[in-house]
Amino acid sequence: MTTAEPSAQSEGFDLARLLAARGAERYELHARHLNHQLPRMLHTIGFDKIYERAEGAHFWDADGNDYLDMLAGFGVMGLGRHHPVVRKALHDVLDASLADLTRFDCQPLPGLLAEQLLTHSPHLDRVFFGNSGTEAVETALKFARYATGKPRVLYCAHAFHGLTTGSLSVNGESGFRDGFAPLLPDTAVPLGDLDTLAKELKKGDVAGLIVEPIQGKGVHEAPPGYLLAAQELLHRHKALLIADEVQTGLGRTGDFYAYQHEDGVEPDLVCVAKALSGGYVPVGATLGKDWIFKKVYSSMDRVLVHSASFGSNAQAMAAGLAVLSVMENEEIVANARAMGERLRSRLAALVDKYELLSEVRGRGLMIGIEFGRPRSLKLRSRWTMLQAARKGLFAQMVVVPLLQRHRILTQVSGDHLEVIKLIPPLVIDERDVDRFVDAFTEVMDDAHHGGGLMWDFGKTLVKQAVANR
């Protein structure tokens, strides 16, 4: 080889050049090599956009059009995209060239992040770091079963705790579970039903109850007093309360954790992830009481009885530390509370105006907008047509024009639900709130007063739903 003929190896890897050359193939590449149904679904509903850059609660397409993000990557982008403090922390940790993941030393960053996390839940003592929310749940399930010596974990109907085998066992939706049995010996109980909880606990084999203080699917909040009463019942039967704060944690609901809205609730194990990453490096954490950790790691022989190959890596720990610093210095929790109240109150004021709008619920910046059967004959016949084809189509009819006409990204809050879930970045401001409410109002006006294009799209969704049966 001569210097006049450089090889691909000597030229090195050039990410910018690769993206410039192949970026336009994104949907084709996914269809060919990844989940082929994803690009098919995006093409069907017109979500096959090409976004070029992002910052905060906004992203832009190649034509410079601004889009408002009310989805936050399913809650991952708590601080929005590319927060400068988190970016700098990651540059700094890479430039530091740390001796990371040696496995036989104790680096400072995991201990520092654990220390900071625990200040927000002073009744807890120790942290295990993994790489995702489902890993945090898996850890909690294992620790609860080992610490109590009991095999069964209770979960709530309609819960979502992840899709790996353990967390799938406590997933309250059959659509995710079908075809993956056998799973762990766990049992569903209705959210808020203390009598059923007590009945299951009397059987003596329950290790714990895992619960989302506000369920992501449908945005249903645990009834007032339920978590505290459940905690007392569980402890009476030597079982544990596990709070899944993967989506609700780190300020989402207007408190650092959602369980903190109810005085006296002190879960034995708490699962967090998503926003802790800063939107960059996957990270999950399971916080727990000292006695639980000491029982699991009871001797030097058991020092690696539960671990994760990439757990506690320097980049994830640096991102987490930066996130917690930003949350304190920029008063992110207070902003989530204030903007959430503004958004929820403005939307709730529309319930009496629109007969297709049934309820607005939630806390902080976790809000559910539910649609329901209208009163008027014309609207009712259209609603019935959609429901006969597939429940959830009207909510999808609202989501699509929000993106297509108003450049606002939202999601339907689960399969077969007429609910839109709003989980925007916690950094949104009053202009973002007002932009969403104004756009939503226009879409609802169209749905109630003609809106031929909107209902024509509904017919397309009906045809697609029937074809997929």
Image (cartoon, helix red, strand yellow):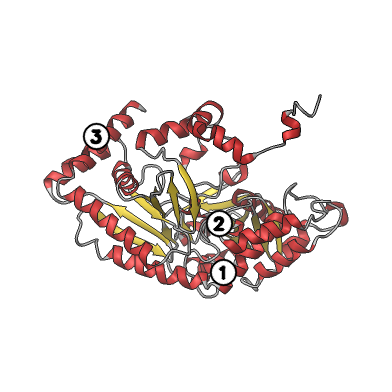
Tell me residue 162's x, y (percent): 56, 47
Q: Residue 346's spot in the image, x, y percent?
A: 29, 66
Q: Quadrant of residue 125?
A: bottom right
Q: Is disc 1 placed on a helix, strand or loop?
A: helix
**Residue drawn at (72%, 29%) of the image:** 8
| Residue indicated by mark 1 | 327
Residue 443: % across, % down: 25, 51
Check the image and report above or below for 55 versus 348: above
Helix, strand or loop at label 2? It is loop
Where is residue 35? Give x, y as percent.
52, 32
**Which residue is labeled 3 in the image?**
459
Residue at 53 percent across and 57 percent down: it is: 211
- Residue beneath disc 2: 82
As drawn, the residue found furthest toward the bottom would be 263
Q: How many angstroms separate mark 2 from mark 3 (CA)?
A: 39 Å
Q: Alpha-carbon neighbours of circle 2 within 10 Å: few (<14), some, or many (≥20)?
A: some
Does residue 441 appear anywhere in the picture?
Answer: yes
User: How many other residues sit within 10 Å of disc 3, few (<14), some (14-19) or many (≥20)?
Assistant: some
Q: Earlier in the sequence, mark 2 or mark 1?
A: 2
Q: Using the image as rendered, state which of residue 189 and residue 200 is in the foreground.
A: 189
**Distance from Cα at disc 3 to Cα at disc 1:** 45 Å
Residue at the far left: name it.
377
Estimate the spatial distance between the alpha carbons at disc 2 and disc 1, rounded to whole Å: 15 Å
**Type of amino acid under label 1:** Met
Of marks 2 and 1, the one in the foreground: 2
Q: Amino acid at mark 3?
A: Lys
Q: Nearer the viewer, mark 2 or mark 3?
A: 2
Say if residue 202 shows up in the picture.
Answer: no
Give the residue at x 51% y 69%: 332
Depth check, mark 3 against mark 1: the one in front is 1
Q: Nearer the viewer, residue 383 or 82?
A: 82
Q: Is residue 64 left or right of residue 252?
A: left
